[in-house]
Image: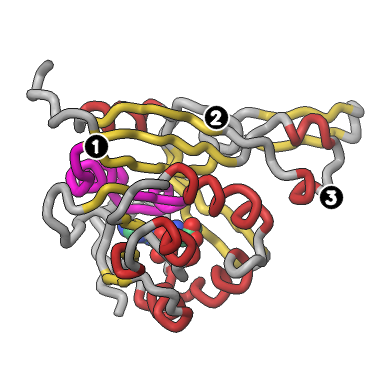
Amino acid sequence: MTGVESSKSDSEPPATDWDELAPWWRATFSNGADLEYEMQILPLAAAHLLGCDRILDLGTGEGQLARRLVANVPEPGLVTGIDPYSGQLANALEQGGGPVYVQARGERLPFKSGSFDGVVCCLVIEHADEPDQVLAEMARVLAQGGRLLLLINHPVVQGPGSGFVDDRVLDERYWRIGPYLTEQVVIEEVDPGVPVRFAHRPLSGYINPLCEAGLVLTRLEEPEPPLEFLSDSFDLSLERAMPRLCLMCFEHRAGPLPVGE
Ligand SMILES: C[S@@+](CC[C@H](N)C(=O)[O-])C[C@H]1O[C@@H](n2cnc3c(N)ncnc32)[C@H](O)[C@@H]1O
């Protein structure tokens, strides 16, 4: 396939081809290759979705979250992973483990409203063409009482232009913060020869649309980067104080608010 529609204008960087990146993603981030997934992302997602019987993993990639979440549910087939890219889904299917996989975009989920007790969207929304549409769809398919986990790169300290600065001339080391409120789409070379498109928006750009769709923010996690992850650090105490991940947990406690209120 690709079958991935896009509504973006020509002036924005092109969408990432996740079919092309599928072998890289699998080798670099799954099955124990990435410490952040092993030590933080997978355990946090499993803990926050305990008790959810029907789980959707939106933007499942090669399926490592979906496979992990199978242990949370009464039957393996109650975890569904969706992804628009067949290359990613082929890797997920090849590894099996019980989840059901469906090829679909997060902007248009092929499920009835209220189909899931738990929805997880992990490091995906920054790559979606229409993030507001993805947020609306996640809220729609979440049942009353259900839980939504949104994991993103921490937009306050990890956005475009942010990061550790080692100024050898002035002999200063500090963390620079980029223009936090500016919504922008950038291409970052995340590994040599691996360009990935990221859309940045402030935290309010995630929280407010979900609250307006009737969800309530119940928990915010900003874990310290694992020590093992920072083995090459120039300034451990500074880098440990700068979160990489931001996890937001929402609950569906009421119906959507009437327009205008
Ligand atoms: C950084 S990977 C994360 C994969 C997986 N969530 C994980 O944490 O292992 C981003 C994933 O988002 C998927 N993706 C990109 N655009 C999407 C969209 N519009 N809807 C759903 N998934 C999308 C990509 O195919 C890719 O698998």
Circle 2 packing at 10 Å, graded few (<14), some (14-19), many (20+), is many
Residue at image coords 74%, 34%: 240
Task: Identify which amino acid the numbered label 2 is placed on.
Answer: Val
Task: Identify which amino acid the numbered label 3 is placed on.
Answer: Asp
Dots 1, 2 in contact, CB < 8 A: no
Q: Give me the disc on residue 232.
A: 3
Residue 124 colored in magenta in the image:
yes
Percent x, y for residue 115? 18, 53
Q: Check the image and name the residue furthest to the bottom.
A: 94
Q: Which residue is mark 1?
A: 145
Q: Is mark 2 within 8 Å of ligand 1?
A: no
Task: State which image quarter holds ligand 1.
Answer: bottom left
Magenta residue span: 119-144
Residue at image coords 66%, 66%: 33
Percent x, y for residue 209? 27, 31
User: Residue 86, relative to residue 252: is it above or below?
Assistant: below
Q: Which residue is mark 2?
A: 156
Q: Is residue 14 left or right of residue 209?
A: right
